[in-house]
Amino acid sequence: MKTPEYGLFLAVLPKYREECIELLRTELKGDLEIEVSKAHLDMSVKTGIRRDLYRETPMLRIGGKAFIQIPRTFMTLRVANLVVDLNPRSLSVWPLLLIRKILRRRTLVWGHLHPQAGGSANTAWLRRLLRWLADGTVSYTYRDRDRGVQELPDKPVWVAPNSLYRQNVIRPSVADGDRHCLIYVGRFEKAKKLDLVIRAFALATDRMEGAKLLLIGGGSMEERLREICSELGLGVDLVEFVGWIDDVEDLRTYYSRSFASASPGFAGLGLTQSLGFGIPMIVAEDEEHSPEIELGTDGRVSWFASDNPAQMADKIVVRWQSRGNVPIEEASAFVRNRYSADAMSKGLAAALTGRDETYV
């Protein structure tokens, strides 16, 4: 069997990466092999792309702090160009970078340039060391690309903007009637602080006649969140647990009913999703946001003090009062042009093939 020219060896590839991977395979004419594990160190983050697109590799988790992936084949050593996680917690990446350097095979690291605490965090040097050992970096954002070039001028940096949907489906969500919903889409986990948005919504309801909170997703906190709704007297007429929705057109129907989205904990890819539909987001200020927060400018985001339900409630009401200005078409166009699965796959393809698109 012919050895592929290109490979991805990553912890996971969630469902929302499927569009990007399909486009990448087309761009590379199928000359791509992928190995990922079933779930990440945080087991609520799972691989969800089509099973025929990858080979599953086991993961050994070490005390909830690090992990080792055991490759199923020698793909990780054979391919000429390999992308691995920019994640110091992956104890497989370190030796792989060193061995491939000895074999004179090209290896790139892909991920967030810095830990969530930022470039001054105590562990930030570990990511810089990974980048120094690699032949280049693939960053999630344009701002991180610039920072990466400043930190290690001799190491190329490509951008594969963290994205969800193909360019041709990113457009403003048009309302069929009145926009009366505040929406959250994502995992129901402790770090997301969903109890905060429920408490804030409860404080705001007497100022928003007919408003409703939509919670789309699922996770370990769902039962507790339902209990909080009951304790606050928020019935199904005020709060709806919708369940998981992956299809973009199904999601569009819910965003078309919404005047704003909410991120009570750290914000990340959900901001890209919301703005792609033209829906502004209400975001906590003092959280360790993912780099996608660079999108939160020009009136696209309303900020409130972290862990302050009263202030969040005020921001919800302000967005409710200005719902006639939604969707924000400029925000949707910006995401369509810069944060599509097409742009992400092109960035990955440029990095894998070594095309000089570092500064594009």
Image (cartoon, helix red, strand yellow):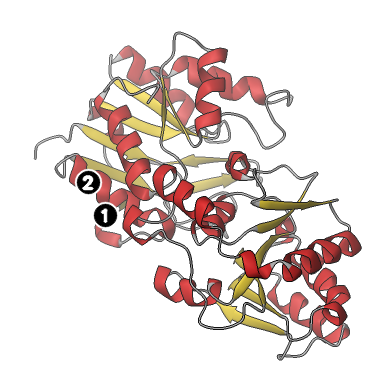
Rounded to the nearest whole Å, what is the CA distance between mark 1 and mark 2?
9 Å
Q: Residue at x 24, y 27 (%)?
A: 353
- Which residue, given by chain and number where applicable, does mark 1 sit on? 53
Image quarter in which the C terminus is found: top left
* Residue 337 occupies quadrant: top left
Nearer to the camera, 103 or 174: 174
Whether residue 247 is visible = no
The amino acid beneath tag 1 is: Leu
SS at mark 1 in the image: helix
Badge number at residue 323: none
- Which residue, given by chain and number where applicable, does mark 2 sit on? 25
* Label 1 crowd (10 A; few <14 / some 14-19 / many >=20): some
Q: Residue furthest front?
A: 324
Q: Residue at x 22, y 46 (%)?
A: 25
Nearer to the camera, 21 or 62: 21
Residues at discs 1 and 2 in contact (Cβ within 8 Å): yes
The amino acid beneath tag 2 is: Arg
Q: Is residue 312 above or below residue 110?
A: below
Q: Residue at x 75, y 58 (%)?
A: 264
Across and down, in percent, residue 323 comes to: 67, 69
Image quarter in which the N terminus is found: top left
Whether residue 105 is visible = yes
SS at mark 2 in the image: helix
Q: Is residue 58 left or right of residue 90?
A: left
